[in-house]
Image (cartoon, grey):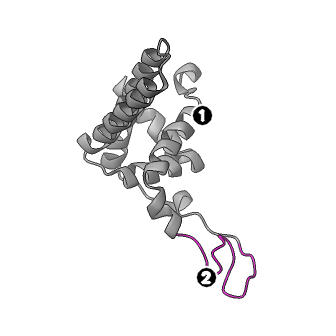
Amino acid sequence: MNLEKRSFPLTVFALVCAFFLCMSASAHAQEGYGQHGQEGYGQHGEQHMMESPAMEMQVSDAKLEKVASAYSEIQEIRLDLQDSLAGVTDPNEAQEMQMQAAAAMEEAVQDNGLDVQTYNQVMEAAQMNPELRDELFTKLEQIQ
């Protein structure tokens, strides 16, 4: 397999995931916190390792194809935004362009039959699970 095609920077995954994770932050903020309001602590304050459901996540081939397609579209939107922002000096204009890009990214996810939370979950799992990440790369290569 061509290493160059597989060398999607993980930072791109991280940026896209961070974007969508921020969009659903309120839902995530309420999950995963113990009674003391601190992640990783049990009822009596003892620290414990939290298991990551992303490592164990089972993703169907059809869902992975949808995620790959959405990711490809999001990359195009991100690159277009990056090019467009290069000549912008007005912060309000830049913010408006970013908001439009965010809406377009969310629409790309939904147009592929996914919700943002599902897309985020699969992308997070792909970051942490090498096998799933390889499957996603394969789907992305098929698209391109």
- Please give the name of the residue rendered at 37% of the width and 42% of the height, measured from the top-left corner: 67
In this picture, is 120 found above or below 138?
A: below
Residue drawn at 56 percent across, 58 percent down: 55
* First in residue order: circle 2 vs circle 1: 1
| Residue 138, x across and y down, in percent | 44, 34
The chief SS type of the magenta part is loop
Q: Amino acid at mark 2?
A: Gln
Q: Nearer the viewer, residue 109 or 7?
A: 109
Q: Nearer the viewer, residue 60 or 102?
A: 102
What percent of the width, then of the height, locates residue 29? Answer: 52, 64
Using the numbered discs, state the Cα–Cα distance from disc 2 to disc 1 in whole angstroms.
33 Å
Q: Is residue 32 left or right of residue 61?
A: right
Closer to us: 15 or 99: 99
Query: Label 2, on which residue?
Result: 35
Residue located farthest toward the bottom when viewing the structure as drawn: 44
User: Is 37 colored magenta in this rendering?
Assistant: yes
Pointer 1 local density, CA inside 10 Å: few below 14, some 14–19, many at least 20: few
Q: Which residues are magenta?
A: 31-48
Seen in the picture, residue 124 relative to 48 is either above or below; the reply is above
Q: In the rendered picture of this protein, how many numbered marks are placed on residues? A: 2
| Quadrant that contains the C terminus | top left
- Can you give x and y, in whole percent of width and height, for residue 5 in the image? 52, 22
Task: Tell me which residue sits at (49%, 25%) in the image.
Answer: 91
**Number of the front mark, 2 or 1:** 2
Task: Name the outermost residue toward the top.
Answer: 87
Instruction: Locate residue 144 relative to residue 51 in the image: left or right.
Output: left
Q: Is residue 86 left or right of residue 117?
A: right
Which residue in the structure is indicated by mark 1?
A: 11
Estimate how packed mark 2 is, as few (under 14), some (14 to 19) or many (20 or more) residues with alpha carbons within 10 Å.
few
| Residue 137 is inside the magenta segment | no
